[in-house]
Image (spheres, rainbow, N blue to C red):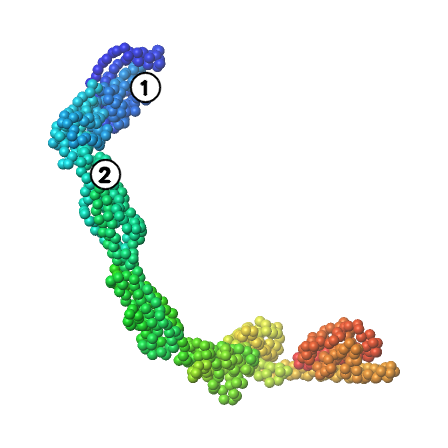
Amino acid sequence: MERRHKGNGRALTRQVLLLSLLSFTCWAASEQIHYSTPEEMAKGSVVGNLAKELGLSTKELKHRNLHTVSVAKMQHFSINAENGNLYVNDRIDREGICGKNPHCFVQFEVVVENPLNVFHVTVEIQDVNDNAPQFLNSNINLETGELTLPGTRFLLGKAEDPDIGMNSLQDYQLSSNQYFTLEVRERKDGNKYAELVLQKSLDREKEQTLHLVLTAMDGGKPRKTGTAQIRINITDANDNPPIFTQEVYKVSLSENAPIGSTVIQVIASDEDEGSYAQIRYYFSNMPATSQEKFSLDPIGGIITLIERLDFEDNDEYTMTVAAKDGGGLVTHSNVEIRVLDENDNAPDVTLTSMFSPVPEDSPSETLIALINVNDKDAGDNGKVTCSLQDDLPFKIISSSNNFYKLLTVSPLDREKNPAYNITITATDNGTPPLNTHKVILLQISDINDNAPSFEKSLYAIYVPENNPSGASIFTIKASDPDVDQNSRITYSILNSNIEELPISSYISINSETGTIYAQRSFDYEQFREFQLQVKAQDGGSPPLSSNVTVRVFVLDRNDNSPRILSPSQEAKSSALFEMVPRSAEADYLVTKVVAVDADSGHNAWLSYHLTQATEPALFTVGSHTGEIRTARAFVERDAVKQRLVIMVKDNGQPSLSATITLNLVFAENFQEALPEMKSQPSSSEYQSDLQFYLVLALAVISFLFLLTVILAVTMKLRQSGHPRFLQCFGPVPHSKNGAIFPPNFEDGTLPYSYQLCLSSESRKNEFTFLTPNIQIAENILGSEKPAVPFTGNSGNNFHSEMANGEEVRFVLCIYMCELFISCHEWRSHWHDF
């Protein structure tokens, strides 16, 4: 680096203007600072130290505020305000900043305050050899005749180098050759260019084209170069006729060659140049068949296929090709094209004879079909062999004259394969081989060779007891792989292990469907299982059959209530007494209720429950054991005599139960308990006698009242002249519209009988509660309805005739209803006591 102090008019002018802009009160001084740095310096490189150049220390820099004014010019440099160093801030490319200018400067102003000073800084950018010479056109093409005289000059393109001085373009160099030399010339602007100078006559027959290399070099260290390729074409005169490369062109072409493929290229050469060396090709005396297949490029001499070839139609083509130059000279050559056979025809398979269907019991070597095979190709391409695909019980053998026989090799089984898709493959010996697949459908006819078979060797049928008679309980199925009549199965029952009655009274079977029906309702408690043999027979000739064992298990239902064995209940109305000591403690075993259930399984699981008790908290019952124990000790306030109602319930769905009433007496000995035990029968007998006398009195009064009513009715009927004393018990007179009641209504029950004593209106309005009895009777007697409804108004004469009788019957029916209800209530009370 160096420091230079310069003062000139332009610098003084810039300084004055800058000072006038900053402040007119500030004292300004100007100095010129000059630095020099090479281009392409690394970013962060130090150009110089401004503080040192300005004579400022590091401490003074903090107060003097060193900074630049020309911010736009500082893109390549930066100033560190702390140490005063000037750094490279960005890539410096001298050629990009100054171009070809030999002097390249970057100028900017630096300001120092307190006091204010402005300094002009100039940084000179020094050139380095960072660019190689480059030709504007790296490929130079020249053309000259072989008669060109020596000394002829050819101007070459120049090279460019953006560097300056010795780093710029300095010289050219030509590659070694025997015809040309190189001369370097310089223009007024200093640019250098090169010229080729012919030193020796050219000979086109020896060399038609010359290739040279021109090299441009600069003067930098290290030296850099650039190259350009020079191509020189040498032209000649037309003094020779066209000549074919061959007198006869022979080519072999596959018949499967695609349309547009090149067959052959005929080539004729001419030593002349220019228009005399331009050759055109055409067919001469071309056959019509060849014109349809081939075309000839008149310029390139390429023969192209324009239509598919077929060896089977024509296997050879011959044609003549002519070559004519621009001077009119013509030369001929023959082209022979041989068509090669390709394996392009697959074998043709023809089914001559077919024998279908074939019985499944046919022996081996049975003839199935006769087949003919043919291939249009020649040689090995036309030789065909036949084979069968898959592992089938058939074989194919050659007969004669391209005929083949299809035979069976083992017995057939229709049940395994009712039909066969036999694939015959005919393959030729071509490369690659072609094949044809022929599928033959062969049906196998059935014979009765399979007996019916059941799905299981033993069937177990589970039937709940109390099943409805005639209901289906199971369907047994047998299968027969045969078809049609050979697979038509009928079912029958052979025998059973029931000896008391024939099996038909228990079980029947539908001969067609195999559905088994129960002929009666089964009772699990009578018998729990039985066994029978079912036979399945097909309809073949002769028929085949098979048997299977069927075991019928009767399942239990909860149809039996628990039966209490202990304590004994021989007399339902008698009371059961147990004596309990007064001193019994808690958990004292009083008695045990023992019950059984005729059912089984869950239906026979019994549980015991205390439903009623004089003192519920005094006793407990074991839910599974039936043991009645004291829950606590007896106290004085407890009743001496205790009444317990025990219910025994099974676990069926729905559950059934039975109850037993126990009378317990708290006493220390039998003599103390005897008075309590005797008081119960006397009271019962008293209530029974009282009830008996009440019923007897009611019956006598009812009889007297009934006798009075009958006498009154008899007298009334005699006075009216219509004796119908028994009309209440006989068919009711009816109108011409039809009968009101069925003719056999007197066969009904008591409620039905006295219901018939009512008129239509009475039965409809006052005694509608008896209507269900009438419906049950109608269901029993039949589904026909009377022609005239009970409540109709069309029988006016009937009502007039029956007016008196209806009143009597009305009173009589009311009395009989009351008598029936009283008797029913008496029977209920008698049962309770």
- The image quadrant of residue 816 is bottom right
Q: Is residue 356 left or right of residue 782?
A: left
Residue nearest the viewer, comparing 49 with 734 = 734
Q: Is residue 581 visible?
A: no
* Farthest residue, direction right: 719
Q: Please give the label number shown on residue 407.
A: none
Give the labeled residue for mark 1: 69
Residue 317 in the image: above or below residue 13:
below
Q: On the rendered structure, is 448 left or right of 13?
A: right
Q: CA distance from mark 1 to mark 2?
A: 85 Å
Task: Say which of 153 and 613 sits in front.
Answer: 153
Q: Earlier in the sequence, mark 1 or mark 2?
A: 1
Callout 2 crowding tier (Cα within 10 Å): few <14, some 14–19, many ≥20: few
Q: Residue 771: in sight, yes or no?
A: yes
Query: In the rendering, at what x and y percent does residue 220 appear?
Result: 16, 26
Q: Eyeballing the image, is 9 above or below 723?
A: above
Q: Amino acid at mark 1?
A: Val
Residue 566 percent location from the top left of the image: 55, 82
Q: Are marks 1 and 2 in contact (CB under 8 Å)?
A: no
User: For the residue labelled by badge 1, is the local secondary structure a helix, a strand or a loop?
Assistant: loop
The one nearer the camera, 729 or 473, is 473
Apparent side of residue 96 relative to residue 803 in the rendered image (left or right): left
Q: For the C terminus, which image quadrant? A: bottom right
Q: Give the residue displayed 52% in from the left and 82% down from the top.
A: 508
The relative height of residue 572 versus residue 64 in the rendered view (above or below) is below
Q: Residue at x 18, y 47 (%)?
A: 246
Q: Residue at position x 83%, y 82% from top?
A: 713
